[in-house]
Image: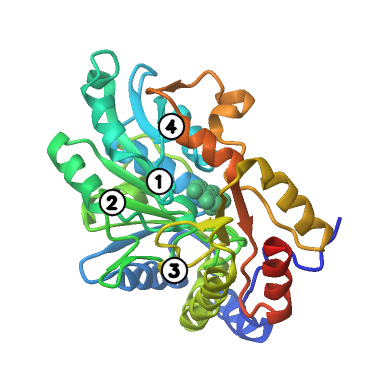
Amino acid sequence: MSYKVPFIKPDFPPADELVADYLEIIKANWYTNFGPFERKFAQKLGEYIGPGYYAATFANATVALQAAILSTLGKGDGSKYVIMPSFTFPAGGDVLIWCGYKPLFVDIVKPGLHMDVTVTKKALKDKAYGPNIVGILFCNAFGVGSLDIVEWEKLSEATGLPLIIDSAAGFGSLYDQKRKVGSAGTCEIFSFHATKPFAIGEGGAVISRDKQLIDDLMSIQNFGFNQQKKIDQLGFNGKLQEINAAIGLRQFKRFDTILKDRRAIFERYQAKLDPDKFELQANASNASLCFAAVLVKDGSKRDDYLANLQAAGVDAKTYYAPTLHKQMYFKDTAHYSSLYITDEVDASILSLPIHDSMEPDDIELIINTLNE
Ligand SMILES: *Cc1c(COP(=O)(O)O)cnc(C)c1O
């Protein structure tokens, strides 16, 4: 079914700009393998986060996550746990298993929708799980920066556990006015998939202060070849193509406008949605806003709201519900204590469209349909 208001509306640079880039790529006869567009894009990504940050680009965020886990934890033998939320996109659980680790789900908090640091500390002290936990795969849910990020960094420092942060949808988001998402933990992972606010088609990146980690990630994504062209570790092919890096460089030029547009739409939702019925995700006003995550206070009505929006021609969703522990493949995955809040959010989450330059009438339609 096609909707009057689609859930996501990818927004790419104009064709004539890209023609020039493509001609340059053909002239250079260099299509992939760390060509000039990719090198420049990686540099811009690091600079965007701030002085002292470095980036490795990837073919997508899933292989970026996989390389980050391999580099920080090595390949596991299937006996150790990595803490992660059930309320996330499947990529995190998939890569842990591919890398030889068992996910250990912990509960989340409302209305930030990221993992609960207090519960995580208890899991680390637990006699059965604690000694077997080797890392933390944190998720900035929907790319919205966690207001507790400093607590997580302190925990990582105190325990020595790597803090790998899946911020996939959140390039351009802020933790607060002084700090960008991308600047925290051992490293942060971004996706530039066509459906994310910073869209290049397929693409991703890892950003870190640790230059050695970034160099290692470039080796892993290039079949394990190191800078001396010798293979000293397990690798795969995860490289970003020149044409996608060229699109990324063009997106940088429009990105401030894109962010301003998206935040203005979120502000309309924030100002107009009935606060007795709806609660917005904490800190979302500082995010790049792939969409707006709303908690329906009376969860039993969530499916009615969804149906009403769809009947009005609006494609709304319920990301990340059903959560991972409700999916067939992950249903037997270990979890520490209850996933009570995760289940509550699973039943009450509603995701509302945000596009670059969205029609004011479309925003009104969504707000009025929900408030009525
Ligand atoms: C989109 C997304 C991914 C996957 O990104 P790809 O670039 O498509 O591999 C992973 N994690 C989260 C939280 C996401 O939102």
Vertical relation: 74 (above or below) 182? above
Mark 2 surroundings: few (<14), some (14-19) or many (≥20) residues within 10 A? some
Please state which of the two labelled residues, at mark 4 or mark 1, is closer to the viewer: 1
Q: Which of marks 2 and 4 is nearer the N terminus?
A: 4
Quadrant of image for the N terminus? bottom right
Disc 1 and disc 2 in contact, CB within 8 angstroms: yes
Question: Label 2, on which residue?
Answer: 148
What residue is disc 4 on? Answer: 96
- Residue type highlighted by circle 1: His
Q: Does residue 211 appear left or right of residue 343 in this picture?
A: left
* Residue 117 drawn at (x, y percent): 29, 39
Q: How far apart are marks 3 and 2 (CA)?
A: 16 Å
Circle nearer the N terminus (3, 1): 1
Q: In this rendered view, identify the residue nearer to me: 155 or 346.
A: 346
- Disc 1 crowd, CA 10 A, few/some/many (<14, 14-19, 20+): many
In percent of width and height, residue 344 lies at 53, 37
Q: Nearer the viewer, residue 181 or 65?
A: 181
> Gap between marks 4 and 3, in whole Å?
31 Å
Mark 3 — residue?
Answer: 285
Q: In the picture provided, is 219 more to the left or to the right than 61?
A: left
The colour scheme used to paint the residues is: rainbow
Q: Which mark is residue 114?
A: 1
Residue furthest to the front: 276
Q: Residue at x 25, y 71 (%)?
A: 178
Q: Residues within 10 Å of mark 3 (few under 14, many from 20)?
A: many
| SS state under label 4 | helix
For label 1, being within 8 Å of ligand 1 is answered no
Q: Which residue is drawn at 56% across and 36% down?
A: 323
Number of residue marks: 4
Residue contact at pointers 4 and 1, CB within 8 angstroms = no
Amino acid type at image mark 3:
Ser
